[in-house]
């Protein structure tokens, strides 16, 4: 099978490419023209193409049997993320149809879920975000619409679609996770320290995408990707500090206190800045719920459908991370936050967002779907 992978040069993508190659398939990695000459992935072909430019996609799809769609925009304002993620996906789907390619494995996200609707467990039956979607951050809005567009296309074209929704993906170079807590000077504040974290080690996650291509049972399935081992936020943070030599003091903060603080900050912001005040992401109640709410995260459907099992346990995965960081001469302890977190501006209330432009585009998508 010849497989086109979008986002194949990224953190998850490189591992997905390796997993697909290991199963005997050939891989084409779609890379923006400005970067194509610099990207080298052993065993894979690199094709220049930009999801924002439809005319650049046809050549990359020549002879392709299936597509693994990982690409999504994680930085920039809400309108930028929406355009790059959703409109880029529309362009890809149109090019796939023109090329006669109707097998798609799509990478969604836990951000599409309505975390208020989850009770003790969050699984594939949990409702998706809808009525309060535009109160979420730009990434959640874009990923939710991206999945909607993919599903509508698959239904309209009788395509063979699999949707995978990974939890928080971690691995070498990306050990710090937004679902754990917040560093404040010498303190490592852990929100809801005893709760289970919905994490998956990047190599384990990549295997799920490769398996989904080969399993007939995966067609039509929606699967959450979470590792077997249940790791609390406190344990993850402690292992992070120990493995990377981070000299900070772990401090627990109950989930209820975090939510109360966020609600209070929201009320104060609205009273002082009626036209829209800025709040850091950790104080946005909807975002805090999606990151820190205490739930169980079963992966039974993933294992039953794909026959998947994680190759690496939590301790073994950390061994691999430390070795890889050393090999790459990465001083992870000096990195204060993930790249996307550092670049992102302070979160804004809905009145300050680029919601009008997003809403117009959303309406266009809805009208097209029902035309």
Image: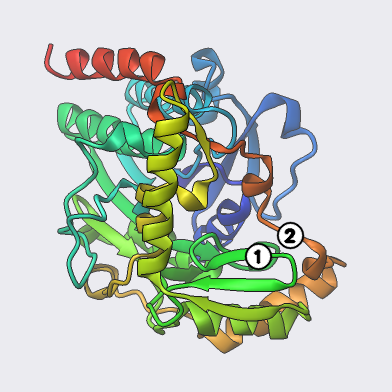
Estimate the x, y position of residue 34 in percent, counting from the top left: 74, 26
Mark 2 and mark 1 in contact (Cβ < 8 Å)? yes
Helix, strand or loop at mark 2: loop
Residue 59: image quadrant is top right
Estimate the x, y position of residue 80 in percent, counting from the top left: 53, 23
Q: CA distance from mark 1 to mark 2?
A: 8 Å
Q: Residues within 10 Å of mark 2 (few under 14, many from 20)?
A: few
Residue 182: image quadrant is bottom right
Q: Residue furthest left?
A: 370
Vertical side of 172 occupied by 12: above or below: above
The reply to whether residue 312 is visible in this rendering is no
- Looking at the image, residue 67 sits to the left or right of residue 324; the answer is left
Q: Residue at x 36, y 27 (%)?
A: 93
Query: How many badges with numbers are in the image?
Result: 2
Vertical side of 20 occupied by 364: above or below: above
Estimate the x, y position of residue 233 in percent, counting from the top left: 48, 77
Q: Residue at x 40, y 14 (%)?
A: 357
Helix, strand or loop at mark 1: strand
Q: Residue at x 54, y 59 (%)?
A: 178
**Which residue bears the numbered disc 2?**
336
Estimate the x, y position of residue 62 in percent, counting from the top left: 49, 28
Question: Which sits in the foreground, 237 or 122?
Answer: 237
Give the mark nearest the N terminus, 1 or 2.
1
The reply to whether residue 324 is visible in this rendering is yes
Q: Residue at x 16, y 26 (%)?
A: 156
- Looking at the image, residue 4 sits to the left or right of residue 298; the answer is right
């Amino acid at each position: 099978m010849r497989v086109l992978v979008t986002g194949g040069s990224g953190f998850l993508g490189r591992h997905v490419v390796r997993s697909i190659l290991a199963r005997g398939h050939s891989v084409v990695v779609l890379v923006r023209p400005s970067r194509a000459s610099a990207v080298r992935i052993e065993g894979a072909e690199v094709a220049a193409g930009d999801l924002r430019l439809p005319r650049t996609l046809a050549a990359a799809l020549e002879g392709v049997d299936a597509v693994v769609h990982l690409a999504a925009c994680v930085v920039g304002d809400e309108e930028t993320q929406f355009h790059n993620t959703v409109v880029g996906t529309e362009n890809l789907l149109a090019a796939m149809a023109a090329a006669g390619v109707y097998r798609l494995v799509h990478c969604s996200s836990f951000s599409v879920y309505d975390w208020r609707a989850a009770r003790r467990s969050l699984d594939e039956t949990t409702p998706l975000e809808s009525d309060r979607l535009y109160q979420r951050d730009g990434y959640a809005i874009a990923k939710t619409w991206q999945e909607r567009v993919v599903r509508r296309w698959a239904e309209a074209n009788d395509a063979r679609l699999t949707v995978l929704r990974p939890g928080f993906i971690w691995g070498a170079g990306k050990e710090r996770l937004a679902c754990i807590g917040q560093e404040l000077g010498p303190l490592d504040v852990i929100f809801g320290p005893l709760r289970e974290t919905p994490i998956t080690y990047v190599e384990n996650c990549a295997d799920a995408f490769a398996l989904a291509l080969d399993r007939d049972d995966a067609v039509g399935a929606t699967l959450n990707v979470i590792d077997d081992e249940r790791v609390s936020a406190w344990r993850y943070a402690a292992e992070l500090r120990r493995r990377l030599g981070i000299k900070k003091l772990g401090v627990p903060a109950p989930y209820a206190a975090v939510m109360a603080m966020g609600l209070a900050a929201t009320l104060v912001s609205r009273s002082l800045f009626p036209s829209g005040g800025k709040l850091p992401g950790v104080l946005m109640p909807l975002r805090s719920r999606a990151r820190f709410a205490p739930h169980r995260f079963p992966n039974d459907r993933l294992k039953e459908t794909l026959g998947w099992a994680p190759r690496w346990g939590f301790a073994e995965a950390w061994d691999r991370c430390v070795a890889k960081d050393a090999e790459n001469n990465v001083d992870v302890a000096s990195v204060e936050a993930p790249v996307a977190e550092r670049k992102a501006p302070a979160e804004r209330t809905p009145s300050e967002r680029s919601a009008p432009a997003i809403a117009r585009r959303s309406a266009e998508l809805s009208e097209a779907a029902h035309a």
